[in-house]
Amino acid sequence: MFQLFFLNSNWNNGVIMIGIFAIVCITLVSIIINFMMNSKKENKPDNHE
């Protein structure tokens, strides 16, 4: 019972964890988009040969 009350009363840890999760997700998505853009640029010169 005390643990449930403690989790509901302390929001700082949850906010920090959600913030870190959001930063990691945005970073991973940006890396994937960067790889996709680079692969498209590399395929264009190969088609001209």
Image (cartoon, rainbow, N blue to C red):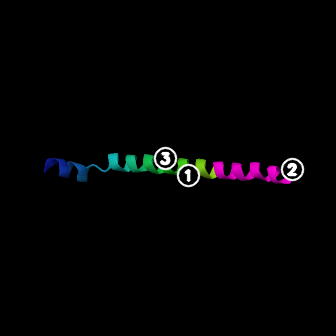
Circle 2 residues within 10 Å: few <14, some 14–19, many ≥20: few
Image coords of residue 17 (percent x, y): 38, 47
Front-most of residues 43 and 29: 43
Mark toward the start of the polypeptide (3 vs 2): 3
Q: Secondary structure at mark 3?
A: helix
Between the residue at mark 3 and the residue at mark 1, the CA separation in whole angstroms equals: 9 Å
Asked whether, in this view, residue 16 is left or right of residue 5, the answer is: right
Q: Which residues are magenta?
A: 35-49
Front-most of residues 10 and 34: 34
Image coords of residue 16 (percent x, y): 39, 46
Q: Secondary structure at mark 2?
A: loop
Q: Residue at x 37, y 50 (%)?
A: 15
Q: Residue at x 76, y 51 (%)?
A: 43
- Is the Cβ of the residue at disc 2 closer than 8 Å to that at disc 1? no
Between the residue at mark 3 and the residue at mark 2, the CA separation in whole angstroms equals: 39 Å
Identify residue for label 3: 24
Between the residue at mark 2 and the residue at mark 1, the CA separation in whole angstroms equals: 32 Å
Image coords of residue 24 (percent x, y): 49, 46
Front-most of residues 46 and 20: 46
Image coords of residue 7 (percent x, y): 24, 50
Asked whether, in this view, residue 44 is left or right of residue 25, the answer is: right
Identify residue for label 1: 29
Viewer-nearest of discs 2 and 1: 2
Q: Which mark is residue 49?
A: 2
Q: Secondary structure at mark 1?
A: helix
Mark toward the start of the polypeptide (3 vs 1): 3
Q: Residue at x 44, y 48 (%)?
A: 21
Q: Residue at x 70, y 49 (%)?
A: 39
Within the magenta stretch, is there residue 29? no
**Residue type pointed to by label 2:** Glu
Q: Residue furthest left?
A: 1
